[in-house]
Image (cartoon, rainbow, N blue to C red):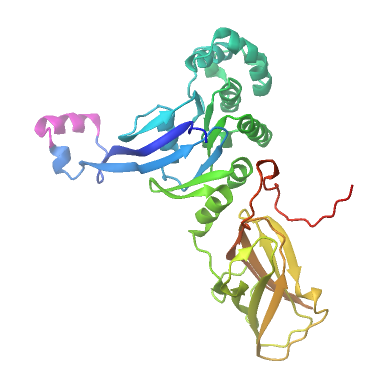
């Protein structure tokens, strides 16, 4: 097994922050107050306290891996990348790096604003340890990708934010560092440029180089990264496959097999005469790939219902619907009398690859929609433990397709 290209060993980062509220003072008040009592800040309750932005962070990164780092604002994501980029040192712990690191953390980072775009390309290449002829060999590709050819000899300080971003990303990606660190900065670019960046980062990863990507855009992270890390309050809450990490982020790690639906919010419908009450998922058993799943849905009505249709859909963690099923597959017309409680059972094979998915419930009748309850439960489909040879790894995609081949 190859050595990790990055080893992060018990990294912690401490900042000293102001405690309490210090009122605004004019310069005259501040100077006068200082000479009256030089140490009054501490006595006024505005002293300093320690804040740990990161605490005991440890993980290994291997060549060619693309890792997404997600979490709420203030979780420590950007601080971690700044430590890996050697912008700021850790308070505790150490990092072992076995490759050149290029980072794109903030718009304009690494640029000298008095120099032209052309000069900054060579400056950045030199910082990465590249020789002039290596930079020249990549120069045309950088300019073409960034789209700033007309302004190449203009000082960076006259570039728009988007132009700075495009040039900075092109420099970071095309000068072929072994490790590429990208922060949320891509959100500044337009949709077309974001697509180009994601495509380039995917290409960088497949070429054997390593990408660490911080973003709140979960669809981008999911499309690019196979592995992920969830940070919360400076600590690793979960790491593993990206889909599972995103699921933990969105569900706080809770996957249930029985759900009381009565108090769940309904969308777009207000109906006191009909209610879905509970949901049972696969009788409490694990759900495996390409196997049958059973859902038990109980409901109650207070008024007669004509032509009742119950249904469910399964969506990914970004709420893109993948599968939708309705009771009309078995019952073309189902009518209810006054005030009854019923339970309907549906058995199906979702044909979905292993991962974490959302389950949504709904009901309608001849008069229209009765209920829609989105994201009522999270289900986990577990991969079957099948040994695959190196040349026959698991296929890509969401669905398992039955097929017959003949030669």
Q: x, y (%) of residue 309?
A: 75, 76
Whether residue 153 is visible here, answered yes or no, is no
The answer to which quarter of the image holds residue 30 is top left
Residue name at image x 66 percent, y 60 percent: 289
The residue shown at (46%, 38%) is 60
Q: Is 296 located above or below residue 383 in the figure?
A: below
Between 265 and 247, which is closer to the camera in this rendering? 247
x, y percent for residue 114:
49, 13
State the predominant SS element of the stretch in magenta: helix
For the residue pair 298 and 267, the one nearer the viewer reads as 298
Q: Residue at x 30, y 34 (%)?
A: 91
Kindly give the residue lying farthest to the top in the view shown.
133
Q: Is residue 303 above or below residue 170?
A: below
Specify whether 26 is left or right of 168.
left
- Specify the farthest residue to the right: 407
Extreme residue in the left direction: 36
Is residue 95 in view?
Answer: yes
Magenta region: 26-39
Q: Is residue 93 above or below residue 153?
A: below
Q: Is residue 259 above or below residue 106?
A: below
Camera-nearest residue between 89 and 401: 401
Count the labels in the image: 0
* Image quarter of residue 15: top left
Determine if the magenta segment contains residue 35.
yes
Q: Is residue 297 magenta?
A: no
């Amino acid at each position: 097994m190859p050595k990790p290209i990055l080893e992060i060993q018990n990294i912690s980062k401490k900042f000293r922050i102001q405690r309490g509220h210090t009122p605004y003072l004019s310069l005259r008040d501040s100077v006068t107050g200082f000479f009256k009592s030089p140490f009054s800040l501490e006595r006024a309750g505005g002293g300093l306290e320690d804040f740990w932005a990161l605490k005991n962070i440890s993980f290994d990164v291997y060549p060619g891996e693309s890792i997404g780092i997600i979490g709420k604002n203030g979780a420590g994501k950007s601080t971690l990348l700044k430590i890996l980029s050697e912008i700021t040192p850790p308070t505790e712990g150490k990092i072992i790096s076995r490759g050149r690191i290029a980072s794109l953390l903030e718009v304009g980072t690494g640029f000298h604003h008095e120099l032209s775009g052309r000069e900054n390309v060579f400056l950045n290449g030199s910082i990465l340890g590249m020789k002039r002829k290596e930079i020249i060999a990549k120069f045309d590709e950088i300019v073409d990708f960034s789209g700033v050819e007309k302004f190449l000899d203009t000082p960076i300080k006259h570039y728009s934010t988007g132009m700075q971003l495009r040039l900075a990303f092109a420099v970071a990606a095309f000068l072929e560092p072994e490790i590429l660190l990208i922060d949320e900065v891509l959100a500044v670019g337009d949709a077309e440029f974001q697509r180009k960046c994601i495509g380039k980062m995917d290409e960088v990863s497949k070429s054997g180089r390593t990408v660490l990507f911080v973003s709140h855009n979960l669809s981008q992270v999911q499309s690019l990264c196979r592995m992920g890390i969830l940070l919360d309050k400076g600590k690793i809450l979960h790491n593993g496959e990206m889909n599972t990490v995103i699921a933990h982020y969105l569900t706080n790690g809770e996957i249930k097999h029985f759900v009381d639906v009565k108090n769940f919010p309904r969308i777009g419908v207000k109906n006191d005469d009909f209610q879905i009450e509970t949901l049972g998922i696969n009788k409490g058993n694990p759900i495996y790939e390409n196997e049958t799943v059973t859902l038990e849905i109980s409901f109650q009505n207070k008024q007669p219902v004509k032509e009742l249709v119950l249904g469910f859909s399964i969506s990914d963690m970004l709420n893109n619907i993948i599968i939708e099923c309705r009771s009309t597959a078995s019952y073309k017309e189902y009518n209810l009398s006054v005030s009854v409680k019923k339970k309907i059972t549906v058995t199906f094979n979702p044909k979905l690859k292993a991962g974490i998915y959302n389950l949504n419930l709904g009901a309608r009748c001849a008069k229209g929609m009765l209920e829609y309850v989105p994201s009522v439960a999270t289900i986990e489909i577990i991969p079957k433990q099948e040994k695959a040879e190196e040349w026959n790894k698991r296929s890509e995609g969401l669905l398992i397709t039955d097929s017959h081949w003949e030669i």
